[in-house]
């Protein structure tokens, strides 16, 4: 009897997952999406526990308990600034789970043909995504250096190791009985994951995280093929296509290709610094900045990773409140690759209680810049570099940027004149209408807020 | 149609459905989306349960299965909770604003 229930529960679970993603298309329905997603997962778990193959419950229940005991604190304690790390960690967990299941299946059943093919794909993707995600986690958590690490012939080494893993995988598909091959295959896959992320720098993390998301999903889907389980196939395919689309969006937003992101080692090409001579810049104090902002009618704030590093989002919200109260129209312009993962800035600003209808996407805000009195750039660099438009030889050439340079006045909060992540000089800083505000983003914004408030009190 | 063929059909249709659905997600919600799909991919727990709960499980497969259930549960639990925590923060107009 219970045996005929589980397929029905699986179908309902798949429907739940599809609805969950569908409802993510708007903030108004998104939380409903989370609930149907949870219900879907619950149905899938209950359905599986009811299957007659499942005899032994104690270890499963202990595992549920241990997993929840780790998962719940992560969910509540983790600060919002750690979202990119958490995401990388979660890709690692998912991929490792998938690889371990594939390994167990291999030793248990020693399958042949199609099933073995699916199993090899599952474990290959699972193992390499696991180590790659852990590396990404390390870089995001700043345990590992964020700069790309490069050496001669890197791409050849990587390609060699990957081909080795694939060749062993094919050999295993041909003769699954050669069990000694399996650990070597797994090791090569694990090693490739590490090597894949070594040459990738922080600015490329949004693409890489999205791509790893896709791999983890595809691995789960391959597991579905190996176990002949449609629910796994569907959920994995949804996850895989989601990560893939996000990666494509990120690549487009940087005008680069996948291979360029993965093998191009961005940010190291600029060894021959063109303008070594220090050019003059105009700088301003918080008082002057506050005065200019106060006199403006429209302000567009362009946040970048630097805002996240300085944790300036809450102070920025205070500034937003003060300015809005005084009738200044304040909006935030969000570049798709600002930060370390897709949508990073939106989450941080939402956390600081900035209403989301004040956050504008690149295509919507760009025509507004000529009519903007002040563009305030906080911790962003490459995404506002006009060289992307004007200089065909720049490594940024062709990258879609926020046209902050068209604003009437530009203010840039920056620690020093050190070039940004990609090491590319930004002409925006040397324009006549640009004011550099040197200092820590959070400290500087709070002094602006203080100035604005005293100005109010003085009136 | 063999069961493998059916499986490939299912995969193809699900992948296209995924593309269509995700293209419509506003960039505003890309981070919660990723965290939600992460939670959904914890569906690997199904495979993990089957291996762990099996009667003839060896020590090796039980250890592997057990670890996979733990890892998937971490993902499912923290994934859904964090997604919800993030989505709660997205408000249209906060109090005290016009």
Image (spheres, coloured by chain):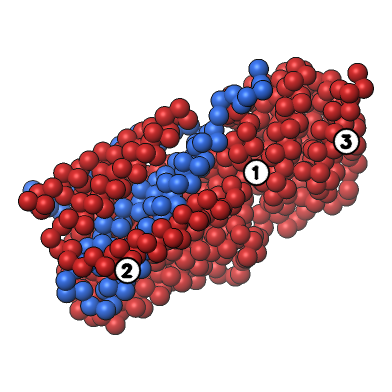
Q: Residues within 10 Å of mark 2 (few under 14, many from 20)?
A: many
Q: Chain B shown in which color?
A: blue
**Mark 2 element type:** helix
Picture coordinates of residue A158, whole percent (x, y):
48, 68
Locate residue A166 relative to residue A395 in the image: left or right: left
Q: Label 1, secondary structure: give it.
A: loop
Which residue lies under the disc numbered 1?
A396
Q: Residue at x 34, y 65 (%)?
A: A63
Q: CA distance from mark 1 to mark 3?
A: 31 Å
Q: Residue beneath label 2, please?
A: B66
Write down the chain letter for disc 1. A
Chain to which the residue tagged by mark 2 belongs: B
Which chain: red? A
Q: Report the residue at 58% width, 43% height from top.
A: A344
Chain letter for mark 3, please: A
Q: Which mark is residue A286?
A: 3
Q: CA distance from mark 1 to mark 2?
A: 48 Å
Q: Residue at x 52, y 50 (%)?
A: A76
Q: Is residue A224 left or right of residue A429?
A: left
**Label 3: how many residues lie within 10 Å, few (<14), some (14-19) or many (20+)?**
many
| Residue A6 vs residue A149, the one in the foreground | A6
């Amino acid at each position: 009897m219970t045996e005929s229930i589980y397929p029905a529960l699986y179908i309902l679970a798949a429907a739940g997952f599809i609805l969950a993603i569908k409802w993510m298309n708007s903030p108004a329905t998104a939380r409903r999406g989370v609930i149907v997603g949870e219900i879907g997962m619950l149905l899938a778990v209950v359905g599986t526990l009811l299957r007659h193959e499942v005899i032994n419950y104690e270890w499963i229940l202990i595992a549920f308990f241990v997993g929840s005991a780790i998962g719940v604190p992560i969910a509540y304690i983790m600060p919002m600034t750690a979202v990119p790390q958490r995401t990388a960690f979660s890709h690692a967990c998912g991929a490792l789970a998938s690889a371990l299941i594939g390994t167990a299946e291999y030793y248990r059943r020693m399958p042949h043909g199609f099933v073995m093919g699916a199993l090899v794909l599952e474990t290959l993707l699972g193992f390499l995504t696991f180590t790659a995600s852990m590396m990404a986690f390390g870089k995001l958590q700043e345990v590992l250096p964020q700069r790309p690490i490069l050496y001669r012939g890197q791409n050849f080494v990587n390609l060699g190791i990957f081909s080795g893993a694939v060749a062993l995988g094919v050999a295993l598909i041909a003769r699954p009985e050669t069990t000694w091959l399996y650990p070597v295959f797994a090791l090569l896959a694990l090693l490739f994951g590490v090597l894949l992320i070594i040459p990738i720098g922080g600015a490329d993390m949004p693409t890489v995280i999205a791509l790893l998301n896709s791999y983890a999903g595809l691995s789960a889907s391959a597991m579905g093929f190996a176990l002949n389980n449609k629910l796994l196939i569907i959920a994995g395919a949804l996850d895989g296509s989601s990560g893939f689309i996000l990666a494509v969006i990120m690549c487009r937003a940087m005008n680069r290709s996948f291979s360029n992101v993965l093998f191009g080692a961005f940010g190291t090409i600029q060894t021959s610094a063109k303008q070594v001579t220090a050019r003059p810049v105009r700088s301003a104090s918080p008082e002057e900045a506050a005065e200019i902002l106060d006199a403006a009618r429209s302000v567009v704030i362009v946040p970048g990773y630097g805002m996240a590093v300085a944790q300036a989002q809450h102070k920025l919200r205070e500034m937003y409140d003060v300015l809005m109260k005084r009738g200044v129209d304040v909006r935030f312009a969000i570049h798709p690759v600002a930060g370390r993962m897709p949508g990073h800035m939106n989450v941080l600003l939402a956390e600081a209680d900035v209403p989301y209808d004040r956050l504008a996407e690149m295509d919507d805000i760009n025509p507004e810049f000529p009519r903007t009195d002040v563009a305030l750039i906080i911790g962003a660099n490459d995404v506002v570099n006009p060289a992307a438009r004007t200089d065909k030889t720049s490594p940024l050439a062709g990258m879609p940027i926020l046209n902050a340079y068209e604003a009437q006045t530009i203010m840039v909060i920056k620690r020093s004149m050190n070039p940004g992540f990609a090491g590319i000089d930004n002409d925006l800083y040397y324009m006549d209408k640009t004011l550099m505000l040197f200092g820590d983003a959070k400290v500087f914004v709070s002094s602006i807020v203080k100035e604005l408030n005293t100005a109010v009190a003085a009136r | 149609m063999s069961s493998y063929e059916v499986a490939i059909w299912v995969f193809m249709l699900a992948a296209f459905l995924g593309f269509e659905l995700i293209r419509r997600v506003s960039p505003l919600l890309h981070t919660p989306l990723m965290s939600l799909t992460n939670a959904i991919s914890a569906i690997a727990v199904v495979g993990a349960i089957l291996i762990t709960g099996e009667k003839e499980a060896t020590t090796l497969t039980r250890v592997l299965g057990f670890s996979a259930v733990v890892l998937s549960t971490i993902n499912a639990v923290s994934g859904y909770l964090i997604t919800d925590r993030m989505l709660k923060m997205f408000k249209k107009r906060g109090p005290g604003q016009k």
